[in-house]
Amino acid sequence: SQQGEEDPQALSIQEGENATMNCSYKTSINNLQWYRQNSGRGLVHLILIRSNEREKHSGRLRVTLDTSKKSSSLLITASRAADTASYFCATDPLILGANSKLTFGKGITLSVRP
Amino acid sequence: DTGVSQNPRHKITKRGQNVTFRCDPISEHNRLYWYRQTLGQGPEFLTYFQNEAQLEKSRLLSDRFSAERPKGSFSTLEIQRTEQGDSAMYLCASSPGPLGQFFGPGTRLTVL
């Protein structure tokens, strides 16, 4: 079953603009991760935020986590055409013996127009 | 390229045939995961290995599916008597611990 729900489902922006993607989840987590997937390919790990962290940065990426609202956001600043891809949030559940298996949302399709 | 390889990249088979996929993880990673992804959906967990031990299997993994990881290195996923509903992308991931997984390019299975 899919725990995460991303919002919006699709996003189209102009190159240079910022893209904000949101994710909500249902159960308690160890951490939340964002992945990118280019069409028909595997997933690339972008950033991980632990449950005791509120904000994290990596290059042009900024991720926030609000565990009280069970939500996260991913901000990509100064977007480029190469950022066009599907973006997924994935949660590592806080369950004994969960083995860090990830539960993914359905993904957000980001299109960056040149 | 994450360092995780999967073969074949594409497989077309007829309903009822058996298929086997291979995953070569990053060599020092003791954790290995298989996921399945259908069109328009996120990946769904299938099974997990720590070294050679298969520690968890999803309800999605029916008895037609079997996975192995002999010697804790590469892993294989076999589907017997394939059905059209098995058509999907099969993704393998490895990790050294609980802080992020490295995914392979996937094997796209089409069952005719």
Image: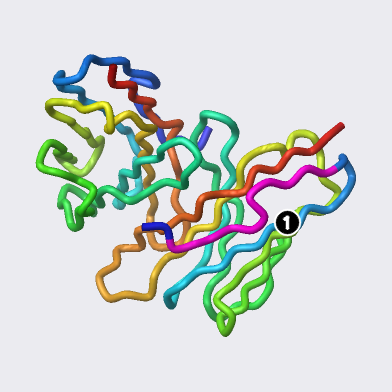
Where residue A85 appears, as percent x and y from the top left, is: 65, 38
Q: Is B92 left or right of A66, judged from the image as shown?
A: left
Q: Is residue B40 above or below residue A96?
A: above
Q: In the rendered image, which residue does mark 1 sit on? A: A61
Which quarter of the figure is the C terminus of chain A placed in? top right
Residue at (43%, 77%) from the top-left corner?
Answer: A28
As rendered, which of B92 and B53 lies closer to the eye? B92
Does residue A60 appear in the picture of this structure?
no
Q: Secondary structure at mark 1?
A: strand
Q: Main secondary structure of the magenta part?
A: strand
Residue A16 x, y percent position in the rendering: 89, 44
Residue B41 in view: yes
Question: Magenta span has A9?
Answer: yes
As drawn, B8 above or below B93: above
- Residue A93 drawn in magenta: no
> Extreme bottom residue here?
A68
| Residue in the foreground of this view, choosing between B79 and B39 | B39
Residue at x 37% of width, y 27% of height? B107
Identify the residue at horizontal 61%, vertical 48% (top origin). A87
Residue A36 location (% of width, % of height): 59, 44
Please, which chain is the residue tagged with disc 1 on? A
Q: What's drawn in magenta, residue-wise?
A: A3-13
* Kind of residue sitting beneath label 1: Leu
B2 horizontally vs B76: left or right? right
Residue B1 percent across, percent down from the top left: 53, 32
Give whichever of B4, B20 is nearer the camera. Answer: B20
Residue, x 36% and y 32% (percent of image)?
B88
